[in-house]
Image (spheres, helix red, strand yellow):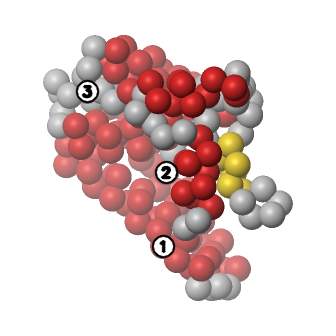
Amino acid sequence: MSDLIADMAYNDQKSQKDLIDAIKLHKGKKTIDSLENVKKGIFEKNCKICINILKDYGYPNYDLVSEETSNDYWLLIQHCDNDVKFQRQALKQLEKFSRIGKASVTNKAYLRDRVNKNLNKPQIYGTQVFRNKNGKYEAYSIQNNESVDERRKSVGLEPLQEYLDSMNNQ
C-alpha cells in the first residue's frame, strides 16, 4: 500500500508541476487544456483508489504506514474535490487519529478547511486560498477571523498574513 500511495502522490504532483510549467512558459491553450485534462484524470483515478484504501484499511495513520505515506495519502484526499462525501469520511478518521498523535494535526486543519470550502462554509484555519482579480492570494471566507491566528498556531501553522505574504512573494 505504501508504494501505491507514493506513486499516486508522485503522479499527482508531477501533473500539477507540468501544468504550472506550461502556464509559466506561455504554452498554447491546446497544450494547457490537455495538461489540465491529464491532471483531472489523475486526480479522479487516485481518488477512486483512496476511497478503496479507506474502506479496506481505514485512514493510513502512523500505526499502519509511515508518516511520509500518511502525509501522501492526505495530499491525495485534498485533491478529491469531486467527492466531498469521501473527503468528509476521511476527515472524520483523520481527526480521530490526529487527536491521539497518530496523524498530522496540520493535515487535519488543511482537510477541514478544504471540506468547508467545498461545502461553501467558512474555513476554520484559513488554509484555502485563491487569486483575486489583482493576482494576489487571499483566503476564502474564515469563521471568527479575529482569532484565526490562535487556531493556526494550535495546529502548527504560521500566522495567516505570513502565509499569504509567502505565497504572494514567490
Label 2, residues with CA under 10 Å away: few <14, some 14-19, many ≥20: many
Asked whether the residues under the numbered discs 2 and 3 touch, taking CB atoms below 8 Å apart as contact, a structural biologist would say no
Dot in front, 2 or 1: 1
Q: Disc 2 vs disc 1: Cβ atoms closer than 8 Å? A: no
Task: Identify the residue under disc 2.
Answer: 43
Q: Secondary structure at mark 2?
A: helix
Q: Tell whether 112 sits left or right of 106.
A: right
Residue 72, above or below 62: below
Task: Please give the name of the residue rendered at 72% of the width and 60% of the height, measured from the top-left corner.
Answer: 136
Residue 56, image quadrant: top left
- The kind of residue on which mark 3 rests is Asn
Does residue 112 appear in this view?
no
- Residue 115 in the image, given as x and y percentages of width and height: 59, 29
Residue placed under numbered mark 3 in the picture:
61
Q: Estimate the x, y position of residue 1 in percent, counting from the top left.
A: 20, 40
Earlier in the chain: of badge 3 and badge 1, it is: 1
Locate the C terminus by quadrant: bottom right
User: Left of 122 or right of it: where is 47?
Assistant: left
Dot 1: element? helix
Give the camera-side residue of 7 and 116.
116
Task: Name which residue type carries label 1.
Answer: Asp
Q: Earlier in the sequence, mark 2 or mark 3?
A: 2
Q: Residue 84, which numbered label? A: none
Q: Which amino acid lies under the numbered mark 2 shown in the image of this protein?
A: Phe
Label placed on residue 18: 1
Q: Are marks 3 and 1 in contact (CB under 8 Å)?
A: no
In x, y percent, where is residue 45? 45, 49
Q: Residue at x 51, y 45 (%)?
A: 79
The residue positioned 47% from the left and 30% from the top of the image is: 153
